Amino acid sequence: MNKHSLTTEKKKFLVGTLAFCGTLLASLAGTALAGTGGPTGAPAAESVTASAPPVKGGAGPEESLSLNGPDALAAYKHSWNPLTAGPDLVSYADTLPEGVFNARFFFYTRFTQAQYTDSGGITALPPGFYETQMLALEAMYFGLGANTELAVLPSLIGTFSSIGGSPLDGWGLNDFTLGLKHRWIIQNPNSARPSFATFFFVTLPTTSWLGTPVPKGGLPPISVLPATHFGSPSLTGTLLLRKNIRPLRFYGGLYYTYSFPGIESVTAADPRIFAQFGDLIQYRMAVEDVVDENRGLGFLLEMVGLSELPFSLDGLPVNTQPTNFNLIGIQPSVEINLTDRLALSAGVLLPAWGTNQYLSTTPNFSLWYYFGKGTLQR
């Protein structure tokens, strides 16, 4: 197989993957707007408030509920939605109630083991190269309104690596991200309509400003959201879906990141160049099976895909190497509530396939603390 055919196959794979994710998002969003489907939810006592009458189980016309008004919110609050940790790798389409504050601590460890070729094969790491990264993220979420949420995502990153025999070790502040989410559609418990939200992130290059020891232009563990190149100011737009169908919850997300061009160097000894990265696209899906509602015990299967495109929205030619890559990982996870307000989840992101990028395994866990009273779960 020649280089041209390999490139063609990669393009076909990427186009096929994007088409699949786009079709999934479009079909679910279309269902949300069209209002088709039968009963898929069951009422539960979780998060019931006296001010809103409960929604009875059974079929009901979706047209009777607004897309995200008080009636749709009341119906959702009285549907099946037990308190659990939820997925580690996919954002929620649903939002916190106004005035509610939650915090979730994530810890990721990436062990780089090999590298993918441009055809998807696996080879050994280059001589003198090794890399282990640890990232501690404190994600804080604030309910700004019935359907709007602010996310503040500060994190610390530790890198222990060698590139061509030159060590790069130490800890420091990672690039800082702020996010604003708006839920346009609230899922209807009596139909197939899912929740649909958009999430917009702004990432500031604090690793460059503070001199954090990271490989310039490199990437944090694939499990981290949003995926951005170290030291590059970035903008990320996101589409999110979520649907609860007892005892399962389904999650989906599509993330597109534009990185502003800038001056980069791999190590301090390398010459500085004007770097133009390709745009990044992530596609994430998860299914959660809640097996014990009282204990918050459940099992999750999550899929993460990350691709760098060979072009950028600003039209400037990509001049970094590799000009494009693909990564796909699968993570099985377990979750359980430690107290009535503290939830734990843990899993291992396993490499499934990739091209032009390092192969790594990423164990991770999270602790989610629910503050306040009343409605605790999104």
Image (tube, rainbow, N blue to C red):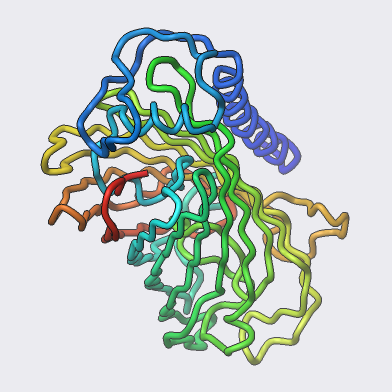
Instruction: Between residue 255 and residue 1, name the one nearer to us.
Output: 255
Which quadrant, please, contains the C terminus? Answer: top left
Decide if residue 71 is on the left or right side of residue 278: left
Residue 221 seen anywhere in this rendered image of the structure: yes
* Quarter of the figure with residue 303: top left
Q: Residue at x 58, y 20 (%)?
A: 27
**Position in image of residue 140 (x %, y %):** 42, 64
Q: Say how many tags the image has.
A: 0
The image quarter containing residue 271 is bottom right
Q: Say which residue appears at 53% left-offset and 39% top-offset.
A: 240
Q: In the image, is residue 319 above or below residue 246? A: below
* Image quarter hosting the N terminus: top right
Q: Is residue 367 left or right of residue 166?
A: left
6 or 91: nearer the viewer? 91
Q: Position of residue 38 (x, y in %)?
A: 40, 8
Residue drawn at point x = 47 percent, y = 57 percent: 222
The x and y percentages for residue 309 are: 70, 49
Residue farthest along the front direction in this orientation:
51
Residue furthest right in the image: 315
Q: Which residue sits at x=13%, y=56%?
A: 339
Q: Nearer the viewer, residue 235 or 101?
A: 101
The answer to whether residue 118 is visible is: no
Where is residue 55? Give x, y as percent: 33, 20
In this orientation, which residue lies closer to the viewer: 233 or 261? Answer: 233
